[in-house]
């Protein structure tokens, strides 16, 4: 399965060229993150991301960008000096798909010495 990440700059309107949001999509798995302005963190919401990208009314409200451009946009959109690295994004996407908070690493499950699980 392809683990390539695709980055999208999101604009408030079709005539705006100032990015207002950022999506990160793991295409091969259909998993996606978006920057949640209300929470000030990344959120796992592939349904919302796919609805936005597949809605013909939004065709002029996003651009696919490379990682370098996504890093520049992130400074403006997130207020953070850097994007998480790609491995961290993959971990966040896996955590979100498993129903965990994407902002917190999932602790490893300790092996049960009795073998009962």
Image: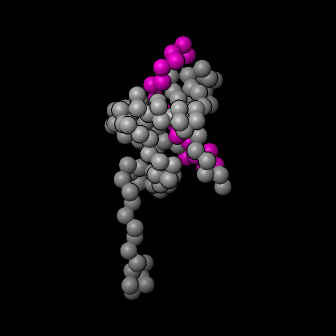
Q: Nearer the viewer, residue 32 or 75?
A: 75
Residue 73 located left or right of residue 60: left
- Residue 6 point in image, percent of width and height: 59, 40
Residue 108 located left or right of residue 26: left
- Residue 49 point in image, percent of width and height: 53, 36
Quadrant placement of the C terminus = bottom left
**What residue is shown at x 38% (from left), y 57% (from top)?**
105
Is residue 96 at all visible to an observer of this figure? no
Residue occupying the far top of the picture? 15
Residue 114 located left or right of residue 18: left
**What residue is shown at x 52% (from left), y 18% (from top)?**
17
Residue occupying the far bottom of the picture? 114
Q: Nearer the viewer, residue 71 or 104?
A: 71
Give the mark count. Answer: 0
Above or below: residue 111 compared with residue 82: below
**What residue is shown at x 38% (from left), y 84% (from top)?**
113
**What residue is shown at x 37% (from left), y 64% (from top)?**
107
Residue occupying the far right of the picture? 1
Q: How is the image coloured?
A: one colour
Range covered by the magenta-colored residues:
13-31
Is residue 40 at all visible to an observer of this figure? yes
Q: Check if residue 23 falls in the magenta segment.
A: yes
Q: Check if residue 59 falls in the magenta segment.
A: no
- Residue 2 point in image, percent of width and height: 65, 52
Above or below: residue 62 compared with residue 95: above
- Residue 67 point in image, percent of width and height: 54, 38
Above or below: residue 100 compared with residue 21: below
């Amino acid at each position: 399965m392809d683990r390539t990440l695709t980055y999208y700059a999101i604009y408030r309107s079709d005539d705006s060229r100032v990015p207002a949001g950022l999506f990160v999509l793991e295409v091969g798995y259909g998993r996606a993150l978006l920057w949640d302005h209300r929470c000030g963190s990344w959120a796992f919401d592939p349904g919302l991301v796919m609805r936005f990208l597949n809605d013909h009314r939004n065709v002029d409200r996003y651009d696919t960008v490379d990682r370098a451009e996504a890093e520049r946009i992130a400074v403006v959109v997130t207020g953070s000096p850097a994007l998480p690295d790609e491995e961290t994004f993959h971990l966040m996407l896996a955590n979100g798909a498993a129903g965990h908070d994407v902002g917190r690493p999932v602790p490893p499950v300790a092996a049960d010495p009795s073998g009962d699980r």
